[in-house]
């Protein structure tokens, strides 16, 4: 009996020791997980601080650059007007190129500011009912002279009664960026703009007959600073921010932006915008 009792006691001691070992192992695992969680929290906080610092830097520098740039553009416009008269007419082309380059830089800075504000959540969006034909018509007419000077055409087909709900300024930016992108890549070709109502909104299609893109480039087209042709000798300039801004603004207004393209078959950009009927309709 003593031997059986001793064996039973030894078994209990072994089981207790095993349980203690398992408890220690579990505690060590919990401590390790807690350390990892703390490290992840620290890394996240540092990443958020770095992102906030980057956004502040981008916003501050863009604002600081916009102030002198506006002065430069103002004087360039005055010079262009004066150069339309003799004896300075021969300088008109140079001043025009100066003004064009300034507007390009201004637009790039606006893109950076928009992305910074989107990242920080600083943008406030209005919700108002808007006539889509008016917005699209104005954007098309602003681009038509440049398109036709380059030997291209731009057409518009949108029902006069189409209405959307959104922020006028932000939606105008979305439309302008998509149209400008299409006109640059069409390069003397055709750009068509059409819109139609859907069950839950309005679909705007902007199509160009430019070189088109492969699946990878199409998937990356709305990624900031992405260039389908990253070489220094690429045919089309730009920082790769226009469609990024357009896609993110569309999403913030409850809509979406998508691309369809294939090499040699042009590109179609779809903008979906929310819609609601007028009150009492």
Image (cartoon, rainbow, N blue to C red):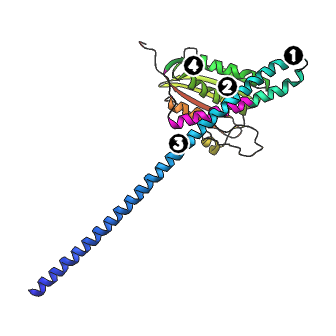
Instruction: Look at mark 4 in the image and give the residue it sits on.
Output: 132
- Residues packed near mark 2 inside 10 Å, few (<14), some (14 to 19) or many (20 plus): some
Q: Earlier along the polypeptide chain: callout 2 or callout 4?
A: 4
In three-dimensional space, the C-alpha distance between marks 2 and 3, rounded to whole angstroms, equals: 40 Å
Q: Earlier along the polypeptide chain: callout 1 or callout 2?
A: 1
Instruction: Look at mark 3 in the image and give the residue it sits on.
Output: 52
Q: Secondary structure at mark 4?
A: helix
**Is 140 within the magenta?**
no
Residue 128 position (above or below residue 267): above
Q: Quadrant of residue 241?
A: top right
Measured from the top left, where is residue 125 in percent x and y? 50, 26
| Start-end of magenta stretch | 102-127
In three-dimensional space, the C-alpha distance between marks 2 and 4, rounded to whole angstroms, equals: 16 Å
Q: Which mark, residue 192?
A: 2
Measured from the top left, where is residue 32 in percent x and y? 38, 63
Q: Residue at x 63, y 44 (%)?
A: 215
Q: Secondary structure at mark 1?
A: loop
59 left or right, relative to 153: left
Q: Name the one closer to the observer, 134 or 169.
A: 169
């Amino acid at each position: 009996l003593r031997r059986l009792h001793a064996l039973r006691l030894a078994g209990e001691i072994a089981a207790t020791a095993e349980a203690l070992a398992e408890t220690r192992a579990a505690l060590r695992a919990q401590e390790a997980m807690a350390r990892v969680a703390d490290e992840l929290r620290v890394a996240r906080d540092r990443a958020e601080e770095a992102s906030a610092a980057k956004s502040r830097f981008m916003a501050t520098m863009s604002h600081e650059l916009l102030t002198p740039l506006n002065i430069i553009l103002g004087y360039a416009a005055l010079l262009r007007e004066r150069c339309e008269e003799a004896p300075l007419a021969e300088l008109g082309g140079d001043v025009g190129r100066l003004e064009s380059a300034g507007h390009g830089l201004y637009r790039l800075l606006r893109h950076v500011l928009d992305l910074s504000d989107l990242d920080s959540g600083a943008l406030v969006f209005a919700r108002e009912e808007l006539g889509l034909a008016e917005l699209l018509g104005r954007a098309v007419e602003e681009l038509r002279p440049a398109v036709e000077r380059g030997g291209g055409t731009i057409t518009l087909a949108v029902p006069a009664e189409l209405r959307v709900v959104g922020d006028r300024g932000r939606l105008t930016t979305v439309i302008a960026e998509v149209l400008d992108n299409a006109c640059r890549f069409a390069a003397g070709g055709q750009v068509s703009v059409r819109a139609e109502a859907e069950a839950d909104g309005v679909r705007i299609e902007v199509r160009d007959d430019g070189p088109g893109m492969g699946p990878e480039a199409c998937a990356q087209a709305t990624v900031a600073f992405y260039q389908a042709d990253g070489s220094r000798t690429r045919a089309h300039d730009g920082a790769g921010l226009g469609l990024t801004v357009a896609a993110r603004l569309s999403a913030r207004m409850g809509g979406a932006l998508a691309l369809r393209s294939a090499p040699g078959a042009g590109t179609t950009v779809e903008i979906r915008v929310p819609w609601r009927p007028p009150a009492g309709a």
